[in-house]
Image (cartoon, rainbow, N blue to C red):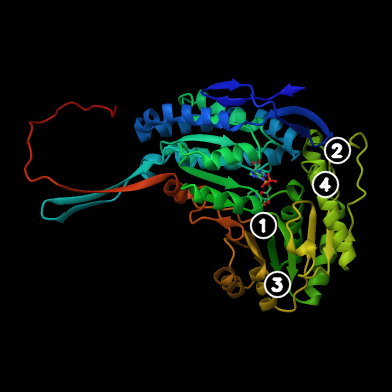
Amino acid sequence: MQELTHYMGGEHVKGRSGRFADVFNPATGEVQAQAPLASAEEIDRAVQIAHEVQPKWAAVNPQRRARVMMEFVRLLNRDMDALAEALSREHGKTLPDAKGDVQRGLEVAEFCIGAPHLLKGEYTDGAGPGIDMYSMRQPLGVSAGITPFNFPAMIPMWMFAPAIACGNAFILKPSERAPTVPLMLAELMEEAGLPKGVLQVVNGDKEAVDAILEHEGIASVGFVGSTPIAEYIYGKGCSHGKRVQCFGGAKNHMIVMPDADMNQAADALVGAGYGAAGERCMAISVAVPVGEETADRLVAALKPRIEKLKVGPYTSGDDVDFGPVVTAAAKENILKLVQSGVDAGAELVVDGRDFRLQGYENGFFLGPHLFDRVTPDMDIYRKEIFGPVLSTVRAGSYEEALKLAMDHEMGNGTAIFTRDGDAARDFANRVNVGMVGVNVPIPVPLAYHSFGGWKKSAFGDLNQHGTDSFKFYTKTKTVTARWPSGIKDGGEFNFKPME
Ligand code: NAD
């Protein structure tokens, strides 16, 4: 049994609390490692180290900080296969999907290479007689991030890349269900030239999270995970005077208009609904066909596609569409919700409950499920299932479909499939959801835009990555300067690089 570590001050450090979490291989159901669960003392030690190194890191000029990101990107590409393998082994997603997880984080590191430009302040020459006014963006100090199991590479990078590029030290508390890749990322950042202690990984659970939220030495907290925990962390973090941004759960609707290309819509739904076993915050979990005839055509197009999906371990290579869910508890919870849908009268068109895979009987596998005639009062509609379960809610009109998406308490992503530009434009303008796709089922914005939901899917006022992240990880200082007289030196003739 492998005992995992923390990564503190540039070293792998054994856990000292005596508490551990089992880390599973979801494909086999075996415990493959134990992750140490940090105590408040261990968090405190990480914060002390961070404070020792952060001022020196902040004093490194932004161009040199950016070069660390440049080298980090090269190392991520070099180690892509190893990172994806470690990720799939703990998460269960297929290898191509695991590479996508690394890639989408890497792209944010690429964006952060632009730190020198992004950190430039504003300047007013001659704001008054002999007066100039300028603002600068300065790092917060020590930032912390608490991340979910479902993107063990991407989401940590979405946080630590901009935080560190801005001159902060960063303490990452990854999911105790998928801790290996975050440890590998910290090693790679150091290999790329980051001074020891600027990025630390402290594994843990609620005890570590509470210690982070209560610690006076931590200026900001980023969180991604389920909505109840997001609300808890936002409230507690803010009440301890921290800058906090929390991203929560989702229930993403895809509206299918009568004029949509039904094959295209069905293909999109299958990928967006079942990819990564539905364990994506941008997964489509609700299809909303407009009109009975559209609904009949959509369900008829979906059923054979879903029945053909191949479920298996990541080791089966390209032959697999999606893998197991993350834990036995997650599987049980999904099965309970499926049963609640059946009990409530929804029509289970594709039933994946009895899925078995020879040789992997103890793995956390589930087949794909498709529900039709789901209604908004049902638990399978109201709750985030986070599994391979797609619900169809039939809407009588476009307005009814729009209202469904708007009335749901979650507002992460949504999509409309149509050939009518006017309907698409109206939808994008009116829907109260943070990320909208037009004939694009999973509209995850690229690194230079920002990512964030509305309603109960996000708490705080700035999004992840893009220019928002540089605002989140810096404070603005504005200087008003007057120089009544100056000292005029002679010329400087040598061309020197910046120190
Ligand atoms: P989770 O909320 O269970 O855990 C997230 C983090 O919070 C982990 O690091 C965990 O250790 C910590 N945590 C868990 N319970 C805690 C508690 N009681 N007190 C303090 N900390 C606690 O989420 P998960 O199961 O790892 O991830 C899946 C969820 O994340 C889904 O709801 C999904 O929609 C959401 N998610 C959202 C986004 C987004 O950007 N909005 C992205 C990815 C995932």
Label 2 environment density (alpha carbons within 10 Å; few <14, some 14–19, many ≥20): many
Amino acid bearing label 1: Ala
Q: Nearer the viewer, mark 3 or mark 1?
A: 1
Residue 265 occupies quadrant:
bottom right
Q: Nearer the viewer, mark 2 or mark 3?
A: 2
Q: Nearer the viewer, mark 3 or mark 4?
A: 4
Amino acid bearing label 2: Gly
Per the image, label 1 sits on a secondary structure element best described as loop
Q: Give the distance between the C-alpha atoms of the residues marked 3 and 4, in whole angstroms.
A: 33 Å
Q: Residue at x 65, y 27 (%)?
A: 17
Per the image, label 2 sits on a secondary structure element best described as loop
Where is residue 293 drawn, in percent x and y? 81, 75
First in sequence: mark 4 or mark 2? 4
Residue beneath label 1, please? Answer: 250
Q: Give the distance between the C-alpha atoms of the residues marked 4 and 2, in whole angstroms.
A: 10 Å
Q: Is residue 305 visible?
A: no
First in sequence: mark 4 or mark 1? 1
Residue beneath label 2, please? Answer: 363
Relative to 194, is 127 on the left or the right?
left
**Label placed on residue 378:** none
Residue 34 occupies quadrant:
top right
Q: Is mark 1 within 8 Å of ligand 1?
A: yes
Do labels 4 and 2 touch, CB within 8 Å? no
Q: Give the distance between the C-alpha atoms of the residues marked 1 and 2, in whole angstroms.
A: 26 Å
* Quadrant of the frame with the C terminus: top left
First in sequence: mark 3 or mark 4? 3
Relative to 400, is 479 on the left or the right?
left
Residue beneath label 4, please? Answer: 331
**Label placed on residue 257:** 3
Do labels 3 and 4 touch, CB within 8 Å? no
